Image (spheres, rainbow, N blue to C red):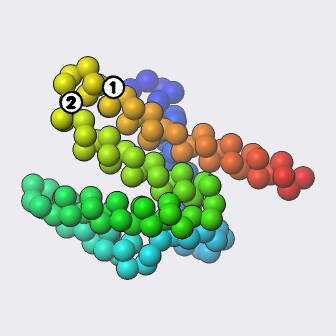
Amino acid sequence: MNFLVTLLAASSALTYIACTALLVTKRWNVFAGNRWIGVAAVAAFVLARAYPQSILAAVASLVFIAALLSVVRHATNALAAILAAVPFATMLLVVDRPFFPEPAATQFQQATIALLCAPGPIAIAAAVISRRRET
């Protein structure tokens, strides 16, 4: 992976970490999804990682999709909707990739990487716009 892609992916990861911290400390008031669906998603994720070759991985994906769709549907903030939609779209690209022949599968992989790199620059742009509106 080249340096720019690594930098973009790192900025996206930091965006998710910062937004999670803001949600936990209640400094960012956005709809974070149904609490029970979120708990079920975390539990399903842990079980899927403990037993990767089982049906639990598929169940975890379905629970995550339900949790992310809940956030996107009820989002009162565009950034929150984007941050929830990116993992959802990424899951769809990753799941669909094996069903396509090689040229299309490679394009799916490149689209997945680009999609995972998008939240960082989008969050930086949103922060700059927000700061400009304050002044």
Position in image of residue 115 (x %, y %): 45, 38
Q: Is residue 2 left or right of residue 47?
A: right
Disc 2 is placed on an element classified as loop
Disc 1 is placed on an element classified as helix
Against 93, residue 15 (above or below) is below
| Label located before the other in sequence (2 or 1) | 2
Against 95, residue 57 (above or below) is below
Q: How many marks?
A: 2
Q: Which residue is mark 2?
A: 100
Q: Which residue is mark 1?
A: 107
- Few, some or many C-alpha atoms within 10 Å of disc 1 (few <14, some 14-19, many ≥20)? some
Q: Residue at x 21, y 22 (%)?
A: 102
Residue type at tag 2: Phe
The quarter of the displayed image where residue 99 is located: top left
Residue 89, visible in the rendered structure: yes
Q: Residue at x 42, y 61 (%)?
A: 68
Against 130, residue 44 (above or below) is below
Residue at the bottom extreme, as displayed: 36
Residue type at tag 1: Gln
Q: Residue at x 60, y 54 (%)?
A: 79
Position in image of residue 84 (x %, y %): 48, 56
Residue 18, visible in the rendered structure: no
Compute the Cα span from label 2 to label 1: 10 Å
The quarter of the displayed image where residue 100 is located: top left
Q: Are marks 2 and 1 in contact (CB under 8 Å)?
A: no
Position in image of residue 88 (x %, y %): 39, 52
